[in-house]
Image (cartoon, rainbow, N blue to C red):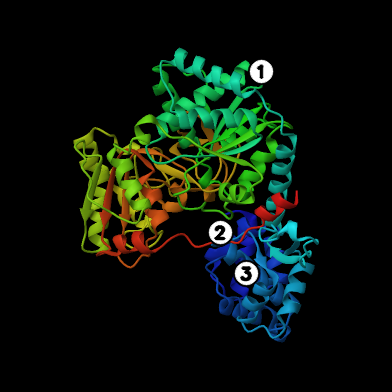
Amino acid sequence: MSEAVEQVSAVLQGMEAPPALAPRLVAALGPGAAAGLAADPWLLLRLPQVTVEQADHCARRALGEGAHPEDPRRLAALTAHVLRTAAARGHTAVEEKRLASLVGRMGVQAPARALEAAVAAGASAVFESTDDSDDDFDFEEGGVPDLPDPERFHALPDLGEAEQRLGGHLVRLISANDPVMDSATASETVDAACDRGGFTVSEHTRAALVTVALRPVTVLWHGPGDAAETARALLCLAAIGEDSDVGLTVVAPTAQTAAAVTADLAAAVGGDPGVRALSLAAALREGPIPSGLVVLCESMAVGTADAAALAAACADGAHLVLLADPRQAPSATPGRVAEDIVRSRTAHTAEIASPEQEGGAADPLAVLALAVSEGEVPEVDAPGREVVRVPASSAEEAAHRVVQLVTDSIPRALGIPAGDVRVVAAREDGPAGARALNAACKERLNPGPGALGGFDPGDAVLLVAAGDGYGPGDTGVLRGPVEGGAEVELAGGARVTVADPSALRRGWALTVGAAHGGRWPAVVGVFPPDVPVSRPRAYTVLTRATRHVSLVDATGGGLETGVRETLAPDRVTRLVALLREG
């Protein structure tokens, strides 16, 4: 136990809080956590599992009569707590009147004072927007549209500033507006790349590639079953980048996704593609990106903060391309970047569609995914066992079926090793949640004493924090202890040293949010009873698989109902306004 954790544990004991919270508080508050917590017990609310009532109890134990409901420290903490709750639901900001209302519902007598206290404490940042699209204003009738009063939004400071940076860097890129190649030359370059690679692209894709060459920021929509066509498009973009002397950088959210994209590129040409995808962490590790074409794959999985870092790394005049499937769930982190760029109408959109998809999806995985995107969960013809439905009567039976599939059925019947199978769970806790499924998979696949902070060499792991060469969402295999921490081999073969053991989780089973943006040969999606299902989340589970998906369904009809009736909730963001305001 580190000295900082020991100090926080002592403070927690003095306020009758569980000392087990100490490591997480040190991670959240930093090395001065003990002093900060002693001075402000409501900082306990930085942990999502701590309730307001619990924080108030601890404050009374620590401060005695000095703890009262209108204490500015408490008011600031409650306001920040609401903002963190909103961020956990995907919002990047909360409108001021709405925030005051939510704080008032927590029993605060003067919500305006609470908001002021949060700003004064640096727990909230205020942003104004005067965006008005004037969609309904008829200039032919004369006059000038009235300027609306500015809207005020509050955000967690880091998140609000990240969205501000993202908007600023996107405007910087959009304002350059210099083509890397004219349309005729771009079309000829695509033809030449197809001839060299021995493949063709659809007319939809050809038009999309010309758009990328001409326009500074482009969102390229695609659908399920388009991985091969996307790879062909990337090879054509590599040719455009080479012939125009600007170069191409392909970025993916995680190392696992980067390896999958690189494999798609190699498959498209039957050998070395001459271009490889980088994880976002690896791309940013190199510093500014010099290429004039930068493509972000699986961009629906990328939230505001990561998108801001990527946009900031793009050189002046670079063309940024976001590959996105609009049917997927929004990112696990706050924001809706690709959708907001499209809604702002400040950038361009185009569509990638493979020749086979233009005539209707034939791949069983794509057929099922498209049906789910339209609100149905039908039985599909899967002669190669691409799709298997596995009913279960309870969460416990679902968990049993999942372990059978991962450790025996899929490797034996399909020849896919257990290491290439990922479980995607609808929840973290519960008998069929990611935590319990990871424990069961470890027991069967890599039992051991957990000598490395609860882990053993050979464990599948998920990284939940950023470090040198890795980022949240990366998955890999723990290889063993090294100087400075534990060595993890990421997909693609890169090895990184993880210094903080709290950055590691078991990684055989992932939540939908953690799996978003990743792709594996086989996926086991598990839907336990009494867990809300939405259409985008079910679709996202299906589209994580490249060869096979098993759906373990214990919802008793809830899966079909959720897919039919429940869409993704809307998110409050400021990016559209930032882009329109320029």
Choose between 50 and 254: the one closer to the eye: 254
Mark 1: which amino acid?
Asp
Query: Is 83 above or below relative to 386?
Result: below
Of residues 5 and 42, the one drawn nearer to the viewer in this rendering: 42
In the rendered structure, the answer to whether residue 44 lies left or right of residue 530 reads right
Which three-letter amino acid code belongs to the residue tagged 2? Gly
The tag earlier along the polypeptide, 3 or 1, is: 3
Tell me the CA gap for discs 2 and 3: 14 Å
Q: Quadrant of residue 210?
A: top right
Q: Mark 3 points at which residue?
A: 81
Q: Quadrant of residue 309?
A: top right
Locate residue 66 relative to residue 236 in the image: left or right: right
Marks 3 and 1 sit apart, C-alpha to C-alpha, by 49 Å
Amino acid type at image mark 3? His
Q: In which quarter of the image is the N terminus?
A: bottom right
User: Disc 2 vs disc 3: which is toward the camera?
Assistant: 2
Graded by Cα atoms within 10 Å as few (under 14), some (14 to 19) or many (20 or more), the crowding at tag 1 reads few
Q: Quick check: can you spot residue 55?
A: yes
> Which residue appears at 64% of the width and 29% of the height?
214
Between marks 1 and 2 in the image, the one whose residue lies nearer the viewer: 1
Lateral position of residue 560 relative to residue 278, left or right: left
Q: Which of 484 and 488 is in front in this view?
A: 488
Residue 493 vs 351, above or below: the answer is above
* Sequence-earlier tag: 1 or 2: 2
Residue at position x 68%, y 31% from top? 318
Separation of marks 1 and 2 at Cα, in angstroms: 39 Å
Q: Where's residue 378, x and y in %?
A: 25, 52
Query: Which mark identifies residue 245?
Result: 1
Residue 90's disc is 2
